[in-house]
Amino acid sequence: MMTVTEKVAYLKGLVEGLDFDKDDKETKVINAVLDVLEDLALAVSDLDDEMALVTEQLDEVDEDLAELEDIFYDECDDCDCDCDDCCDCDEDMYEVECPNCGEVIYFDGEIIEDGEAECPNCGESLEFDLEFDCDCDCCEDEE
């Protein structure tokens, strides 16, 4: 398959092979159009190269993000339920929105059990209430 640049070069060759009179008005228009097509073809080629590079970099960032998500959002393997509140897993993470700045912050269970923490964004002191409402079947035995 020919690239856009190769197609424009082919068209230029065809026009040159027709031996048009170079001083003719129509020939000047055709040559000007071919020059514009050549410039556009080169620009498209440059964009294709840049897009390939950006795509490669984005794939690398996506892989790195997936690794970080696996580490940060590692799910508890100790129980089969979907309830985060009923597991005593040390790796539970809790999402908290700071009432002062609105920043969403993630804390592990140990910090939540302490009852308070400081917002890393604005420094606001956050207090946590440890009462959980769990409607899953696995917590009924604990009540």
Image: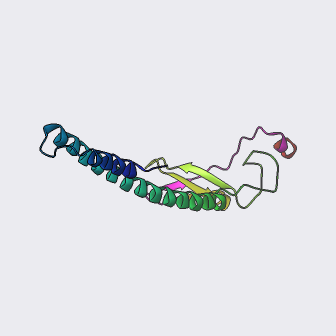
Front-lying residue, 117 or 82: 82
- Residue at 42% x, 57% y: name it: 49
Left or right: 59 in relation to 14: right
x and y percentages locating residue 72 in the rendered image = 63, 59
Residue 142 visible to an observer of this rendering: yes
x and y percentages locating residue 45 in the rendered image = 38, 54
- Residue at 63% x, 61% y: name it: 67
Q: Is residue 8 magenta?
A: no
Segment colored magenta: 118-138
x and y percentages locating residue 140 in the rendered image = 84, 41
- Residue at 58% x, 55% y: name it: 106
Left or right: 140 in relation to 31: right
Front-lying residue, 35 or 84: 35
- Residue at 75% x, 55% y: name it: 76
Q: How is the image coloured?
A: rainbow
Left or right: 137 in relation to 14: right
Residue 115 visible to an observer of this rendering: no
Front-lying residue, 17 or 34: 17
The majority secondary structure of the magenta stretch comes to loop
* Residue 116 drawn above or below residue 16: below
* Residue 135 drawn above or below residue 62: above
